[in-house]
Image (cartoon, grey):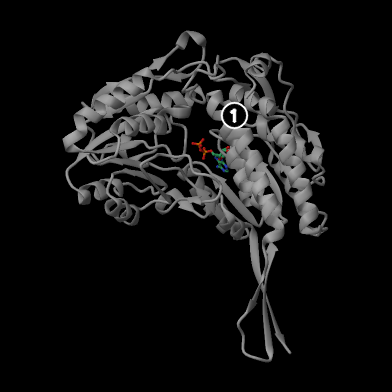
Amino acid sequence: MDTAAIAALRNRPVPAGAHVIDGARRGASDGAVLDVVSPIDGRVLTTIPKGTAEDAGAAVAAARRAFDDGRWSGLAPAARKAVLLRWADLIRAHADELAVLGVRDNGTEITMAYKAEPLSAEATIRYYAEAIDKLSGEVAPTAPGTLGLVHREPAGVVAAIVPWNFPLMIGAWKIGPALAAGCTMVVKPAETASLTLLRLAELALEAGLPAGVLNVVTGEGPVVGAALAASMQVDVLAFTGSGATGRKLLEAAARSNLKRVYLELGGKSPNIVFADAPDLDEAARVSAAGIFRNSGQVCIAGSRLLVERGIHDAFVAKLATAAAAMQVGDPLDPATQAGAVNSEPQLARVLAFVDEARAAGRRIVTGGQRILAETGGTYMAPTIVAGVAQDDRIVREEVFGPVLTVQAFDTEDEAVALANGTDYGLAAAVWTASLSRAHRMVGRIRAGVVHVNTYGGSDLTVPLGGVGQSGNGSDKSLHAFDKYLNLKTAWIKL
Ligand code: ADP
């Protein structure tokens, strides 16, 4: 990260965004735009097209043509790889620009955004590019006289609907394997974080990705996203966002062409600290980062602390100290540890959870309020709420803000019951020095990833996906290819 470049980029005027459809920049069919409000200071940064159903249709038609004529899927895998690697190089070359643009759009602190956005997108595109020509089909163990071949074919047109917290990273988790598999795409970024994905698509064209292979359409979820979900021409829908939207997407798939729908719907992830944790100071420091970085706007955020009763008070005190010491504010300051909450409505939603807990007599250990209002930006103090009950809304529902709840437990069984006591199942962590307990807990916790003696930080080699109402299907790792490939059998009598 070049701090001088970041300082130079922070006030650069941002030209109006444009859809990328069939290789060209376009406005909305009716010319409408949405203001892009920066959560750093509440000012309008630029505009993006307020896409119409017609725009979504044009993008799907372009992706359909590009898939059906084989301009991408028909290339040799090594040729697709070469284009994607050039694209990864361009993403790296534009990392400062992409990182700052993204931070001005969504408010994530730059130290996290730089790694999690351009660098992670680059690594993801590179990972799947490198894998393309290492995937083979199968020869089935059939009886003599027959030959059973299992081919893996690209699934067709993929629509990806992406949230605002990490548009490049989460976008690339879907774009990387889908394009590498030979699919074509329409990506719908979130209203409040579209700018970097638009730029990413422009860089793809510069890298030589054929027109129509990757289209990006901005606008409102219930208009553009809903049109993609209802399309008869989309074969696979990959989504990260809220459970409420996920349900609508499944309905739309059922009402239209039964497209495959993969959902990552967030979590309410338990972070379980046993008294025998190897280093409680380290556990407190990492746990604070695990909930408060990016102001808690992380799908896998460790938002529920479960702590063994014997160390409850001491551990909560350590965490409160760590939380209060976190530098919250201007996300483009490299010293900042938690930037802005994404938008005014999101901040209001998060504060409403805390107000409800306060009104119910729960203990606000630290934080609990908006800060730095004089900047015009949307900032919130890292907040810890103790004395909560399992039925509290703040314990059961995803807050998606810098809010940690704390519950005490006495036994391993009780920890498991609390951990599994929500509808979600995305991530978890266990802090213990006992190898046996660690493995037992990994087995017993219902989640897509269970961290042991750490929180977060996994890489591309392992899958990330939810169980329960956290969704289905995984991003990352070679398993992600399965979502964007169909199996086809050739059964041959010899
Ligand atoms: P959140 O904003 O809480 O992350 P959302 O599910 O509202 O979750 O948003 C995630 C993505 O889904 C965004 O790109 C948004 O525009 C899109 N979206 C919202 N509502 C719909 C909808 N009815 N149909 C399709 N996409 C939607």
Q: Is residue 28 left or right of residue 287?
A: right
Instruction: Please report the residue visible at 74 percent of the width from the left and 31 percent of the height from the top.
Output: 18
Q: Residue 462: image x %, image y %?
A: 51, 51
Q: Is residue 131 left or right of residue 469?
A: right
Q: Amino acid at mark 1?
A: Tyr
Image position of 166 with respect to 468: above or below: above
Q: Residue 265: image x %, image y %?
A: 47, 45
Q: In which quadrant is the N terminus drawn?
A: top right
Image position of 488 with respect to 70: above or below: below
Instruction: Report crowding for label 1: few under 14, some 14 to 19, many 20 or more residues within 10 A (C-alpha).
Output: many
Q: Quadrant of ligand 1?
A: top right
Depth check, front residue: 140 or 56: 140
Q: Is residue 99 visible?
A: yes
Q: Please count the marks in the image.
A: 1
Where disc 1 sits, the SS reads helix
Residue under label 1, please give it: 114
Depth check, front residue: 1 or 63: 1
Q: Residue 358: image x %, image y %?
A: 26, 24
